[in-house]
Image: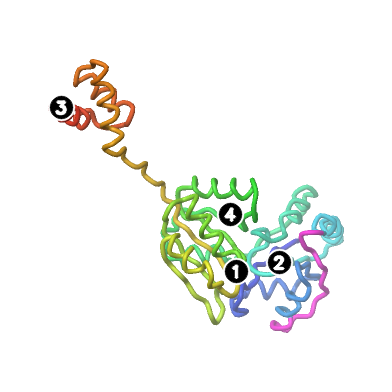
Amino acid sequence: MLTLVASPIGNLSDITYRAVETLRAADVVFCEDTRRSLQLLNHLDIKKPLVSCHAHNERERAAELVARLREGQSVAYLSDAGMPGISDPGAALVSACIEAGLPYTVLPGASAVLTAAVLSGLPCGSFSFFGFLPRDGRGRRAALARIADCGHLAILYESPHRVGATFRALYEALGDCPAALLRELTKKFESVERGALSELAARFSEAEPRGECVIAVLCQKQAAPEPGEAALDALLLAALSEGRTVRDAAALAAERLGLPKKQAYARALALRED
């Protein structure tokens, strides 16, 4: 069987008992980075053969995985941190098992997405995960539009070098929504910076944060601004000057500006008297 094992995102004590038992029982450990996985296995006093399986060779390794499973081997997979398949390799291995009719399972454990959602202090009954935003161009604009449309908590990863720019882009796309920057999750210097997007954009415009960063933002639909008095007055005056009655002018303005008819009628009366 293939077992995808969630690994610690910072604090090595976050490994689960099942994960340790599975790694000890595995015949081989496929891993995103053999150096990172070796550190974890050494910490757990586990000695296993390691096979590199990362984003650039995962499909090739999937064929080797199928061959090993058919030989009766138990294979564990570790990505660098957190849950395999979530902004990490692992999905191609699962697809290969499904296509070949071979068993696989997933062990729950550390997850930066779930940890950040709860730690942010923002409502997280519903949330969407967007991974890393594209750096620029059409893909970045499309991702920001999807975030703006989600209508609930959005979680995304970001490099500390681009945190300030991303907060500015989110502010421009969403308005001044509440947000949080979560840094170095589960580690000694874990921190949470909360505020409106405009505040966080200003705070990190020059002061670059350190360590691994997760952004949480509560995407709230911005109410359309009510038309100003100038727009209402201009429309009513134009209608009245054309010879329309107060009632007809008010009805026209209410329809075009999305206002209550009573409000438009009262203003039309006032303008006629003036």
**Which of the marked residues, 1 or 2, is nearer the chain's N terminus?**
2
Camera-nearest label, 1 or 2: 1
Whichever of callouts 3 and 2 sits on the residue coming sooner in the sequence is 2
Q: Residue flagged by tag 2: what amino acid is it?
A: Ser
* Amino acid type for the residue under numbered disc 4: Phe
Q: Is residue 23 left or right of residue 191?
A: right
Q: Residues within 10 Å of mark 2 (few under 14, many from 20)?
A: many
Check disc 1 and give the amino acid type: Pro
In front: 96, or 189?
189
Range shown magenta? 42-56
Question: Which residue matches tag 2?
Answer: 79
* Gap in angstroms between the C-alphas marked 3 and 4: 52 Å
Q: Which residue is mark 4?
A: 130
In the picture of the structure, the residue carrying the numbered disc 3 is 269
For the residues marked 4 and 2, what is the alpha-carbon distance in whole angstroms? 18 Å
Q: Secondary structure at mark 2?
A: loop
Marks 3 and 1, Cα distance to the nearest angstrom?
58 Å
- Towards the viewer: 102 or 251: 251
Local crowd size for mark 1, using a 10 Å CA cut-off: few (<14), some (14–19), many (≥20): some
